[in-house]
Amino acid sequence: MKKIVLLLMIAVLGGCATHAEIKMPTVTKVHDAVYENKTLNYEILYSQPKPGVFTGGKQLPLAPLEKAELSVASASTLKELPKFIFNQLPVSVKRCFSR
């Protein structure tokens, strides 16, 4: 009986959740003369509660994604976001970058 209770406690404390894995379908590329040789500048800002169990969950300030303090789950989920956004832009856009 003690072993079952111990195993149950370990399972509850250890958790059995998995991190989100976002898979987006491929979107049809936009072909429009309006975007021909245009430059598009964008910046991705991100904020989340301070990572950690004992931090109190204080909200961090908005910061560029590459400089934001990310939890392990956020980092693995958001690592492909800039590439994903770039791939959604119209084909004829001349140059795209994050400031």
Image: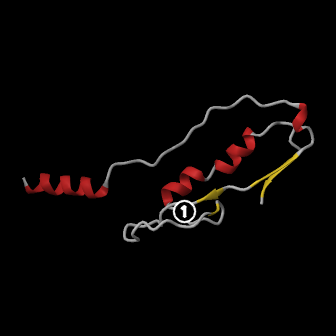
x then y, percent, for residue 6? 16, 57
Residue at the left extreme, as displayed: 1
Q: Along the horizontal axis of the image, is 26 left or right of 75?
A: right
Q: Quadrant of residue 55?
A: bottom left
Q: Along the horizontal axis of the image, is 8 left or right of 18?
A: left
The C terminus is located in which quarter?
bottom right
Name the one closer to the observer, 23 or 97. Answer: 97
Where does label 1 land, which residue?
Answer: 70
Q: Report the amino acid beneath label 1.
A: Leu
| Colour scheme employed for the rendering of this structure | secondary structure
x then y, percent, for residue 12? 25, 54
Residue located 55% across and 50% down the image: 77
Residue located 89% across and 35% down the image: 34
Residue at the bottom extreme, as displayed: 55
Q: Along the horizontal axis of the image, is 59 left or right of 40?
A: left
Residue located 19% across and 52% down the image: 8
Residue located 20% across and 56% down the image: 9
Mark 1, other Cα within 10 Å: few <14 / some 14–19 / many ≥20: some
x then y, percent, for residue 69? 56, 66
Q: Quadrant of residue 29?
A: top right
